[in-house]
């Protein structure tokens, strides 16, 4: 995934802080922001592992200066850069630099702010990568030394003829008492006089030309000589070029060492899983085997969607513990026929011979259950990874490993975007198209479906559990292909939004829903429709006046329209979302915040968006099912906050009586889900029976 720029904005004016974040995002960075507007908030985050890449601090909060931020975010080997903003640079610059600012800018100079943060961000990402590489190098060096120390082959390092390192096998072979005795011993003393000239030549050649090679020499152990093959390589030890000698004493032992080295080189030492490169090699082999008629295998990818949140909250060490936990679960579920791989901290891969859809879905369910049923505990807190599982068949239509990896990643992303908890299989026909071609395909499909009347609205009841009997329906959109296949329009949204035709979809959905609502109004004049809009609607300045005309021409009260806004979209487009919601509220419509409760500051979203309804996210609903007491308390807190804002709460995804029974103990107003009725074209649900 792209690197995410973590910024801490310290500014008593929340609007200005939002503008700062938006300015940085406009530079092309994916941003995760933490906003502090008071001394009290700053004290709170000091105890959290925020670890921002950049601090942007306006000099406008009493008793909270640059020195406070510097002292809080100053580490042993690196200082977090601080961009200080002030009204009068000339008079305050010197003091701000003294206090610890890295650069001082005028408060309203957005162009300089973009340039400065861009430079700092690139440097911070570079430092971050260096730290990762340093950790990897240290880890690799430790593993390599462990192999050397335990190898049955005799191995030594030689600098200017003397031993700088000798493993246990080497010391035992030549009856050397220890590393100290070896350090004063020349390797020439261990070689027969006839071979000393050859050994000198090897030492000189490696030192001068850094060559590698093999040779056969006679060595002396005690009073006896023995003949053996050696391998020599140049190595760098503390800046000095040394020669590594490996004495292959026995073929079987040599083979064992090679197997050890091969195993270590292709596997992650924490999990024992294949590294990304090794796994992709196996995927390539599986793809090539289908060209010869072999039954296709399947590549499965598991993504941890909230990896950054876990890292910020619990630290880097938690990621290793979580990875080991997930690896143990995968080992329990998968058999010897599956190849398991660790792609990176946030992704695991499985190459399986299974290709039947039902078997793959069942495998995905077992994987999820194994991980979810055994949560990781860190610092006495449960860590709940949000998993999304995608798969792609490795059939003859695939030519490159990159296509398989991209397809599986797209499947994971689609599952995440649509909160699909089952294993999602990337469609073959979609996989064969990428980028612009895929967007063009679905855009044309949408246009044809509207023209040929193959686009449908489906309705699912939203039921009150507090005694209200008014009709409320969630509206879904379904496309019927020319072949008769039913496709959720949510699956097409990424392509539709990229192609710029989302406004056409929004207007069709709203127009059709208003007409349906007008017809239904004769039977139920107080009925309401919950309508999902694309993200593009937030920037559509003409939507509100167009909507007003539609309501007037169909004689529909705007109050009966509730427009869903996903919390994720609100966070990414906060100003646009707030203005959009305000325009619709002024028109008389209502707003529902959808998929609520997974952002870093859900209460902030609730306070800034004038909403009438709040829909809990799938993750929060899943915690009810799993009996997660901490998350259940979070839900109760959210409901209490909503009540204070006169916002009604909705628990979606209710699919069983058991799930419904758990909701009764929480102060929730409405429920929806397949337990009441699956989405269909009819509106005839008896709401009085559920009251």
Image (cartoon, grey):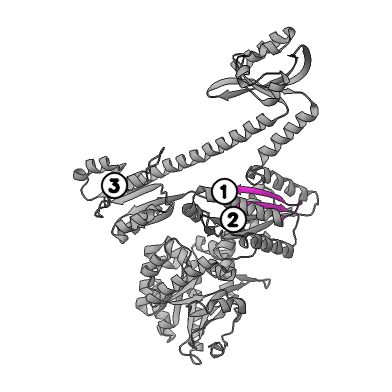
Q: Residue at x 45, y 88 (%)?
A: 526
521 to the left or right of 368 = left
Q: CA distance from mark 2 to mark 1?
A: 15 Å
Task: Count neighbours of disc 2 (C-alpha within 10 A) and say few if under 14, some if 14 to 19, many if 20 or more.
Answer: many
First of labels 2, 1 by sequence position: 2
- Residue 521: image location, x then y, percent: 48, 89
Comparing 293 with 366, the one in front is 366
Comparing 182 with 609, the one in front is 182
Foreground label between 3 and 1: 1
Foreground label between 2 and 1: 1
Task: Count neighbours of disc 3 (C-alpha within 10 A) and say few if under 14, some if 14 to 19, many if 20 or more.
Answer: many
Q: In the structure shown, which secondary structural element does the residue marked by tag 2 occupy?
A: strand
Give the number of the disc on residue 303.
2
Give the number of the disc on residue 444.
none
Q: Residue at x 37, y 55 (%)?
A: 21
- Residue 478: image location, x then y, percent: 59, 73
Residue furthest bottom in the image? 523
First of labels 3, 1 by sequence position: 3
Q: In the structure shown, which secondary structural element does the residue marked by tag 1 occupy?
A: helix
- Residue 188: image location, x then y, percent: 67, 11
Give the extent of the magenta segment: 333-353
Task: Count neighbours of disc 1 (C-alpha within 10 A) and say few if under 14, some if 14 to 19, many if 20 or more.
Answer: some
The relative height of residue 415 versus residue 225 in the rendered view (above or below) is below
Give the number of the disc on residue 320.
1
Foreground label between 2 and 3: 3
């Amino acid at each position: 995934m792209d690197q995410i720029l973590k910024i801490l904005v310290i500014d008593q004016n929340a609007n200005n802080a939002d503008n700062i974040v938006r300015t940085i995002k406009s530079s092309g960075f994916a941003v995760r922001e933490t906003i502090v507007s008071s001394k009290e908030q700053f004290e709170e985050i000091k105890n959290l592992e925020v670890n921002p890449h950049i601090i942007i601090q306006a000099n406008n909060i009493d008793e909270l200066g640059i020195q406070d931020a510097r002292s809080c975010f100053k580490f042993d080997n690196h200082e977090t850069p601080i961009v200080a903003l002030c009204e009068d640079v000339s008079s305050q610059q010197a003091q701000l630099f003294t206090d610890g600012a890295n650069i001082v800018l005028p408060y309203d100079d957005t162009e300089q702010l973009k340039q400065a943060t861009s430079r700092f961000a690139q440097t911070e990402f570079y430092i971050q990568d260096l730290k990762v590489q340093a950790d990897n190098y240290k880890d690799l060096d430790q593993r390599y030394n462990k192999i050397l120390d335990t190898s049955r082959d005799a191995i030594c390092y030689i600098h200017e003829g003397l031993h700088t390192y000798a493993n246990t096998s080497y010391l035992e072979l030549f009856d050397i008492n220890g590393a100290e005795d070896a350090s004063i011993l020349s390797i020439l003393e261990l070689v027969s006089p006839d071979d000393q000239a050859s050994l000198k030549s090897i030492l000189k050649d490696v030192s001068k030309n850094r060559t590698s090679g093999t040779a056969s020499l006679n060595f002396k152990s005690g009073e006896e000589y023995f003949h053996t093959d050696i391998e020599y390589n140049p190595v760098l030890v503390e800046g000095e070029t040394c020669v590594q000698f490996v004495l292959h004493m026995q073929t079987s032992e040599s083979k064992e060492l090679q197997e050890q080295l091969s195993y270590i080189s292709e596997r992650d030492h924490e999990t024992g899983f294949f590294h990304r490169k090794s796994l992709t090699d196996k995927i390539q082999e599986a793809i090539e085997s289908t060209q010869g008629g072999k039954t296709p295998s399947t590549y499965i990818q598991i993504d941890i969607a909230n990896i950054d949140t876990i890292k910020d909250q619990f630290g880097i060490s938690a990621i290793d513990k979580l990875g080991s936990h997930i690896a143990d679960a995968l080992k329990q579920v998968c058999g010897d026929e599956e190849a398991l791989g660790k792609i990176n901290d946030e992704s695991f891969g499985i190459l399986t011979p299974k290709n039947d859809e039902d078997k793959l879905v069942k495998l995905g369910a077992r994987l999820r259950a194994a991980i979810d049923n055994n949560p990781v505990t860190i610092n006495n807190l449960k860590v709940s990874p949000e998993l999304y599982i995608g798969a792609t068949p490795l059939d003859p239509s695939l030519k490159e490993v990159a296509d398989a990896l991209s397809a599986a990643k797209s499947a994971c992303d689609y599952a995440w975007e649509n909160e699909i908890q089952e294993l999602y299989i990337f469609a073959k026909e979609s996989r064969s198209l990428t980028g612009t071609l895929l967007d063009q395909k679905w855009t044309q499909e949408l246009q044809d479906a509207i023209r040929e009347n193959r686009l449908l609205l489906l309705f699912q009841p939203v039921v009150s559990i507090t005694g209200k009997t008014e009709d409320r329906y969630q509206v879904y959109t379904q496309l019927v292909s020319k072949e008769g296949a039913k496709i959720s329009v949510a699956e097409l949204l990424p392509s539709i939004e990229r192609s710029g035709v989302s406004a056409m979809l929004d207007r069709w959905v709203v127009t059709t829903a208003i007409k349906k609502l007008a017809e239904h109004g004769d039977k139920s004049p107080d009925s309401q429709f919950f309508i999902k809009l694309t993200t593009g609607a937030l920037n559509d300045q003409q939507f509100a006046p167009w909507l007003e005309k539609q309501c007037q021409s169909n004689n529909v009260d705007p109050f009966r329209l509730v427009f869903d806004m996903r919390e994720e979209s609100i966070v990414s487009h906060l100003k646009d979302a707030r203005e959009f919601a305000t325009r619709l509220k002024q028109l008389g419509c209502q707003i529902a915040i959808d998929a609520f409760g997974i952002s870093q500051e859900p209460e902030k979203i609730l306070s800034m968006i004038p909403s009438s309804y709040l829909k809990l996210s799938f993750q929060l609903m899943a915690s009810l099912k799993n009996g997660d007491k901490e998350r259940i308390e979070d839900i109760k807190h959210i409901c209490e906050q909503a009540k204070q804002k006169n916002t009604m709460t909705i628990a979606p995804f209710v699919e069983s009586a058991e799930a419904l029974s758990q909701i009764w103990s929480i102060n929730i107003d409405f429920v929806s889900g397949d337990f009441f009725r699956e989405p269909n074209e009819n509106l005839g649900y008896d709401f009085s029976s559920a009251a």
